[in-house]
Amino acid sequence: MLPERGIFLEKAHSGELRDLAHHLSEAITHCQLCPHRCGVDRTRQTGYCAQTDKARLTNAVVHTGEEPPLIEGAGAGAVFFSGCTMRCVYCQNFGFSQLNTGFDHHDETLAEIFLSLQKKGVSNLDLVSPTPHLRAIVSALDIGARKGLTLPVVYNTSSYESVETLQWMDGVVDLYLADIRYTTEAYGMKYSGVKDYWSVARKAIREMFRQVGSRRLIIRLLVLPEGINGTREALRFVYEELSPKVHISLMSQYFPVYKALDLPPLNRKITAREYEEASALLDEFGFENGWLQDFS
Ligand code: SF4
C-alpha cells in the first residue's frame, strides 16, 4: 500500500518542495490553510488553531496501533502536532489538540525528528493533524531529503480540510488516513464546534481520492453511541461517490473522556450491538477492503 520511498523526494530533487515551503511561508501571513480561514498573520498572532509559524508538537513516537499497512517495519513514525481545526468534546488528545501543550521546533529540528524516526526503522511518517503546520512540515521534508530522509508521508486528518490546501500537498503525501466523523452538520456543530463538517469533509475526501485513488486512501469511521457518526451515510458516500475498493477502518475503540464525560449519550462506550450493526453495513454495501477492530 505504501511505497518504499516517499513521493516528496521527486519534488525535493526538482526544487518544487523548496518553492512550496516559500509559498506556504507567504500563505500563513494571511492564513487560510484550513476551512476556518482566520486570515491572521501567524508570524505575529494566532488563529483558531492557536499555532504560530513554528511547528509545535507534543511527541514523536514509534506507533504500532495504526492500521496493518502502516505498521510494517518497526511501526508508524507518528508525529503528534499541537492544535487542531476541530474541538471534539471526546478528543482523547485534548491536552495537545485543544489545550495546546507541546514544544515549538525550528524546521531543522523537525527534520531531525523525522530522521530519528527513520533510524528507528519505521515504515512511514504518520503526521497527525498536520494542517496548521504545513509550512514547517514541507520545509522539514526538504531539509530531511538532503540528509537522507526517504520515508513515505501519511496525512492523518479529521478531513475538515480545505481543497486548496490539499492540492498543495499533491505529490507530497503518499497516503491519506482520513476520518469521517459525522454525516449530519448539527452533530459536527454540537460535538466538534464546526458548522459545516460534512459538506467540507466530502469535498476534501474527493480531492484526496483524486490524488491517491483507492490504493492509498484509508477512511476511518469511529463508531459513536446512538449512531451519531452516521456509519450508513458515510459508507454510502464512499461506495457511490468514490469506490467500493477504498479501505474502510471501522473503529470500536470509542470511550468517553474530556467534556464527553458529562454529555449523554457520549458519556458511555458503544455496545457490542452498535458495533455489530455498523460492521454489518460493510457487507451490505459490499466493501472489498478494510479492517474491523476486535470489539473486546
Ligand atoms: S490553520 Fe489555524 S490560523 Fe490558519 S486558517 Fe486554520 S485555524 Fe486559522
Image (cartoon, grey):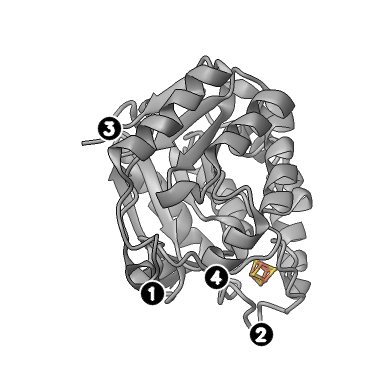
Inter-mark Cα distance, 2 to 4? 11 Å
| Amino acid at circle 3 | Ala
Task: Say if mark 2 contacts mark 4, CB within 8 Å.
Answer: no
Q: Earlier in the sequence, mark 2 or mark 3?
A: 2
Bin the neighbour count of mark 3 within 10 Å (Cα to Cα): few under 14, some 14-19, many 20 and up. some
Residue 102 in view (yes/no): no
- Separation of residues labelled 2 and 3 (CA atoms): 40 Å
**Foreground: disc 2 or disc 1:** 1
Judging by the rendered image, the residue that carries numbered circle 4 is 54
For mark 3, what is the residue?
Answer: 74
Instruction: Please indicate, yes or no, whether residue 125 appears anywhere in the rendered image.
Output: yes
Residue 79 pos. (x, y %):
41, 52
Name the residue nearer the viewer: 110 or 50.
50
Q: Is mark 2 within 8 Å of ligand 1?
A: no
| Closer mark to the observer between disc 1 and disc 3 | 1
| Type of amino acid under label 2 | Arg
